[in-house]
Amino acid sequence: MKKKAIVLLVSLVFLLSFVFVYGGGSKEKKVSIKFMAALYSDATAPFWNETVEAFEKENPGVKVEVDIVNWDSVYQKTTTLISAKQEPDILNTDTIWVQYADKDLLEPLDSYMDKNFKDIFIPALLKSGVYKGKTYGLPLLATVRGLFYNKDVLGKAGVEPPKTWSDFVKVSLAINDPPKLYAFGMPITNFEGQAYISYFLWAAGGSWIDENGKCVINSEAGLRALNFAKDLVKKYKVVYPGWSTVNRDDTQKAMIAGKVGMMMTANFFPSIAKSENPDLKLGVVSIPGDKKQYNLGVVDSLMIFKRSQHKQAAFDFIKFYYNKKWHEKFILAEGMLPVTKAVSNDLESNPGLGKFIKMLSSARFFPAEPSWEPMVLEVIKAWQVAILGQKDPKKALDDAAEKINSEILKK
């Protein structure tokens, strides 16, 4: 009897210890995970605070610490934390995640996901987080780029929004009235310049990288794309001035002010325009192509660092976010596009988002390349000097491709 009593006492102590540490009592010791989230708008912090509160209520053994960081600081702060071996458990960032995956800093997430979980996503968006056959990033939200146009300006000129490059030139010449109005905003700067190059490059049938991982920006299609952009500036003179120095956001402001008739930008532009100029009537179509229209899609992702001591808890929090209630709430608050099938179906009839959700299904994405950032900076520079007339377009592209392949990609 005495021996049994001791065994029962030890068992009771163990059970109480377990409850004390993980599940109950006011002094419980919780698993703590750190989440670095990017700041999208004034709605970002309230959303994550509410989501964390709901998650912690359902998972009392886990505490989530959220650090919301401005986009212009995310990369530098992450780099500093990695150097100090203090990276967060979860990170929300853009395509820069490929650099971390390439350096084996991220946890592959495939073993955490069953088929049912994978099936909640729009396939192309889930695929965007795959690098070398492994899933490292899960799509947080998406955006899609299209050609926005001032309805009143095109209507007054009696022209329809363009579908082809030929149409684009005709429409641009019809509405161009400098210095009062320039037909097209084309910011090829270090901020979003890669998007504008892609608009023309892909429309011409070109690619940034071939199947062997080699930069082919100087292909025949690449040269045709650059020459078309140059003609818009030099030959047709329809581009808003300062295209190599005025960034995307400032070009958007010029369009909102009625100084630009058309520009290619993201689906969140209408909400910005509406708040600043309610009278501006915007239309949007797919990006005009040399032969075929298309759209550019961009995905921001969630990932878990390999050094995390609480990977399962971190994944559980990420999974919680994809609950239809929370994902839809975030998308509506930020004016972005959903990444799950259920929320996409829900919002297809939304007057502000529905048309963009449909455009996203046929979108093309930037390549998953660890050296993407330094590579695009070289190409942006090449396009700038060529359009400005400081270097022959073919030589500018050949020089950029050679430098990228030999010094950056090591091909």
Image (cartoon, helix red, strand yellow):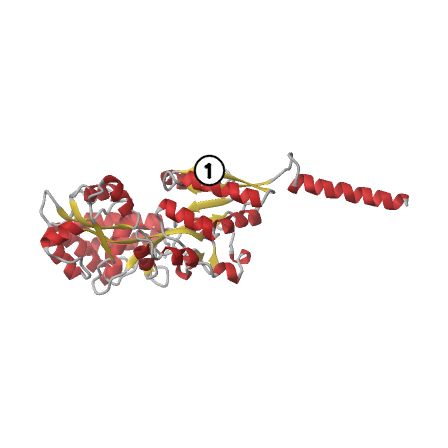
Q: Position of residue 394 (x, y in %)?
A: 20, 56
- On-image quarter of the N terminus: top right
Q: As displayed, is residue 280 above or below residue 166?
A: above
From this viewpoint, which residue is outermost toward the top?
27
Q: In the rendered structure, which amino acid carries the disc numbered 1?
A: Asp
| Residue that appears at 49% across and 45% down | 90
Query: Are there few (<14), some (14-19), or many (20+) residues within 10 Å of tag 1?
Result: some
Q: Which residue is mark 1?
A: 67
Q: Is residue 210 left or right of residue 236?
A: right
Q: Quadrant of the C terminus?
A: bottom left
Asked which secondary structure carries label 1, the reply is strand
Q: Is residue 234 left or right of residue 127?
A: left
What percent of the width, then of the height, locates residue 246?
Answer: 22, 41
Looking at the picture, tell me which residue is in the foreground, 1 or 275.
Answer: 275
Counting from the top left corner in percent of width and height, residue 352 is at 30, 51
Left or right placement of residue 380 versus residue 314 in this view = left
In this rendering, is residue 359 above or below 247? below
